[in-house]
Amino acid sequence: MDEKLKEFTLYLKNTKKRTSNTIDSYKRDISGMYEYMRSNEIYDLDRITYTNINSYILHMEKEGKSPLSITRAISSMKTFFHFLLLRGYIKGEPTELVTAPKIVKKDRKQSSKEVTDKLISNINGNAPITLRDKAMILLMTDTGMRVGEITGILITDINLNMGYINCRNSNTEKTYTISQNVNKALREYINSGRDCLLKGESQYLFLSYRGERLTRQGFWKKIKEYGKKAGLIGQISPETLRKQDVK
C-alpha cells in the first residue's frame, strides 16, 4: 500500500500540479484509511470493498470526526482509487457509490442582502488592493469570520482545491467551507494581486500596500470607504456584514 501512496503523491505533484498543502491533506486521509484497513487485516488494495469503505466512514463518525473532515476524506479516497483503477492496480472503484455526509451549517442571521450586495457592487476593478478587498469582504459575508480572523489568515491556512480555510487562535482551530464565489475571488487576489503587494516575505494572506499584514483598523477603513461610495454611511460595519450565530 505504501508504495502506491508514494506513486499517487508523485502523480499529484508532477501531473496534477497540486500544492504541498493539498498533497499533505491527501496523504493524511489515505494514511488514515490504510491504518483502519490494516487493523481489519486487509493489506491488499484490490481487496477493499464498498462495505469496507462504509465501515471506515462509520468508524470516523464514531471517533467524532466532523462532517467536513469526513467529506474531505471521502473526496481523497475517491481520487486515490480512481488513480489506482486508471493505473490497472485495481479492477473496480470501491468508492464509486459512496456519498459524502451532508454538511449542516449553523442557522445564521444574515446581514441585509440589499446592503451587502450594494456594497460589493461598488468594489470594481483589477487593482491589487481592489482584488484583496473584494476577497476579504466576500469571505466575511460568506463565512461569518471576524475581522481579526480574516486578517490573521496565513497563506498556508487555505486550501482552495478542497474549498476550505483553517482559522487558528490561541485556544481553538476552526475550519470554514467557502463558496465558489469566494474561491474565485481568492484565486484572483492570489494570482493577480498579492504578489504585487508583497515587498519581501510574508506568511499572511492579506497584505497592506506596504506589503505587511493588513490590520483590523485598515480593513475597517476600507469598509467605510466602500460604504461611503455606495451611499451606505452609518449602515455598515464589520459586524453588520458578518453572519451572526443564532443564540
Image (tube, rainbow, N blue to C red):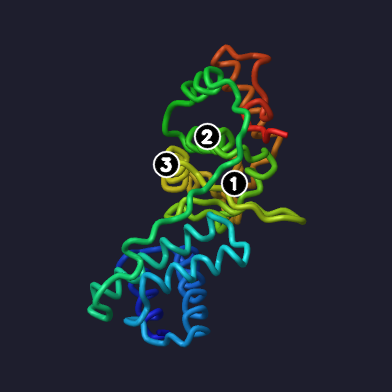
Name the residue tied to disc 3: 180
- Secondary structure at badge 2 equals helix
Q: Which residue is mark 1?
A: 211
Residue found at x 27% / y 79%: 90
Which residue is identified by label 2? 138
180 above or below 72?
above
Q: In this view, which residue lies farthest toward the top?
A: 231
Labels 3 and 2 touching (C-beta < 8 A) = no
Residue 176 drawn at (x, y percent)? 57, 48
In the depicted view, which residue is nearer to us: 74 or 154?
74
Q: Which mark is residue 190?
A: none
Q: Nearer the viewer, mark 3 or mark 1?
A: 3
> Which mark is first along the chain, 1 or 3?
3
Report the front residue among 220 and 140: 140
Q: Is residue 14 visible?
A: no
- Does label 2 or label 1 sit earlier along the sequence? 2
Q: Quadrant of the N terminus?
A: bottom left
